Amino acid sequence: MYINNFLCTYNLDKNNDDLTFLIYQSQLLQAFDLREFNESKINKITSDLYDKYSQNERIEQMIKNRKMDLGIDDNLSLFRSCFDFDNFHKIHAILCNIIELERKN
């Protein structure tokens, strides 16, 4: 399950790197509905999200951008890389938008 009912804020604080990273970790766990890091659950959820939304234009663009940055050809790995510190707030906003539009239809 991916939780999309919150706004990422970790990226807004540019003054305290330690605090910012802790907030990122907390919000990442919140998005995956976890209390502690669990790689297998995160991999399962990201795989499900990729299967469901990989054809979305904004997701495709994120993957394309990551491919240029990382030089990796595996799209699922590239999608998972979108959940890193520098990109999580972007992919979360995209997923929130997609999921919300899906709910309305």
Image: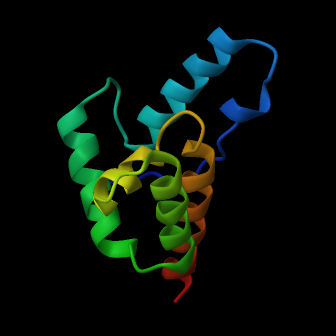
Please, is residue 91 above or below residue 7 in the view?
below
Q: Is residue 47 left or right of residue 65?
A: left
Residue 90 in the image: x percent, y percent?
62, 52
Residue 76 in the image: x percent, y percent?
30, 58
Toward the bottom, the furthest residue is: 105
**How many badges with numbers are in the image?**
0
Toward the right, the furthest residue is: 15
Residue 18 in the image: x percent, y percent?
63, 10
Which residue occupies the foreground of this view, 70 or 16?
70
Residue 73 in the image: x percent, y percent?
32, 59
What residue sits 58% from the left and 44% below the top? 87
Which residue occupies the foreground of this view, 13 or 100?
13
Please, is residue 46 above or below residue 39 in the view?
below
- The answer to whether residue 19 is seen in the rendering is yes
Please, is residue 38 above or below residue 87 in the view?
above
What residue sits 55% from the left and 69% below the top? 61
Q: Is residue 34 left or right of residue 31?
A: left
Q: Is residue 23 left or right of residue 68?
A: right
Quarter of the N terminus within the rendering: bottom left
Toward the left, the furthest residue is: 40
Q: How is the image coloured?
A: rainbow
